[in-house]
Image (spheres, rainbow, N blue to C red):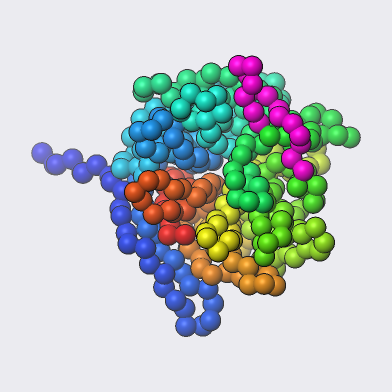
Amino acid sequence: LKAAPPAPVAVIWAPATMPRTDGSAAVRAPRWRGPGFDYQATALAVGNIRGNEGLLAAVSDGRRVFIYPYPPADAKALAEFRHAGNAPKIYSLETADLNGNGRAEVFASLYNDTFARFETVVLELDGDKLAQIAEFPYLARAVQDEKGKTFLAAQQILDDKSFPFGTIYPLVYQNGKYALGRPAVSFIKRRADWLYDFTSATIDGKPATLSATNTDLLRVQFAKGNWKTSETYGQTPNRVRWNGDRMLLFRPQMPVRYDAQGLAGIYLAKNIAAAYGLAAPFGLYTRGEVHRKDWNGLSLATSWTAELGGYVTGMALVAQPGRPEELAVLLVGTAGKSSLWAFDP
């Protein structure tokens, strides 16, 4: 009898940065590469989903949410949640312990085709069961403030061509329910109206909003003046056309890292479309890159790039006791399988 193949395991690599001789940014190899998941992943979040027992990763294929150890040793999920709606599409995942029970909830934001609306279901892991504990009619997204603190923000999207985008508020838990906190998120007044288009950072001691333009450039908006990249970033196949004229892109996160000296890297996904870029309007991507950007006093310069075997649908900076900080990247290959990789930041 032919022996069964061994179970897949995560491949651990030492961090490596390979300098280029042409003066361009160095190319960074992954610290480790996880096993292949047999689906096209749409979203990633990493957090203390099981409390103090270590980090777990939440990954979605659009209909389901899977929980894996972090880093994943094989493709077997610890728990799974399947949305009961009619053809739902989960576009983003976040984790946070808002209800204060010592375990991070998983916030799965989706478009519900049954009711033609955007909403978020809140999931909690209890043993080996991932169960829904709440839902609300807002989208939820982790955003960094100017000092690097991450919080959950929420926005309601309305079927109203005149005023489709609700004000963005912090998401809170009060009186046993998830609700919109006060005051509204103020720094987004610097040219950002869609929850998945922006984050914030402090650059050279000045607060700035990082936001995507409608042509996929990254704008760094200060209180006075702004700067834009010449390259495009944040492309994604995760999109919904809303009210017939606005394409809502659920872009991968733009993690911002700080150290004792201040800003220590902004991480951007760059997905490359098929057919020499002609397939970008249809959301068809064949490969991707991650670029680390550093502020040189005048502009954002690329310090390293990572060339991937697929396009990016999620990123997260991950820190856990006893391990060095790393950048987790969720990517989808051309064969329809997905994998979780990590890079030295």
Q: Residue furthest top?
A: 176
Give x and y (percent) for residue 311.
Answer: 52, 53
Above or below 289: residue 162: above
User: Along the line of sight, which residue is nearer the eye, 76 or 258?
Assistant: 258
Q: Is residue 113 visible?
A: no
Above or below 324: residue 6: above
User: Along the line of sight, which residue is nearer the eye, 279 or 267?
Assistant: 267
Residue 49 left/right relative to 186: left
Residue 307 left/right relative to 12: right
Residue occupying image coordinates x 44% and y 66%: 28
Quadrant of the rendered image containing residue 130:
top left
Q: Is residue 325 visible?
A: yes
Above or below 236: residue 75: above
Give x and y (percent) for residue 298.
Answer: 70, 72
Residue occupying image coordinates x 50% and y 40%: 45
Quarter of the picture holding the N terminus: top left
Give x and y (percent) for residue 118.
Answer: 68, 29
Give x and y (percent) for residue 12.
Answer: 30, 55
Residue 176 lies within the magenta run: yes
User: Along the line of sight, which residue is nearer the eye, 271 or 328?
Assistant: 328
Q: Residue furthest left?
A: 1
Q: Which residues are magenta?
A: 171-186
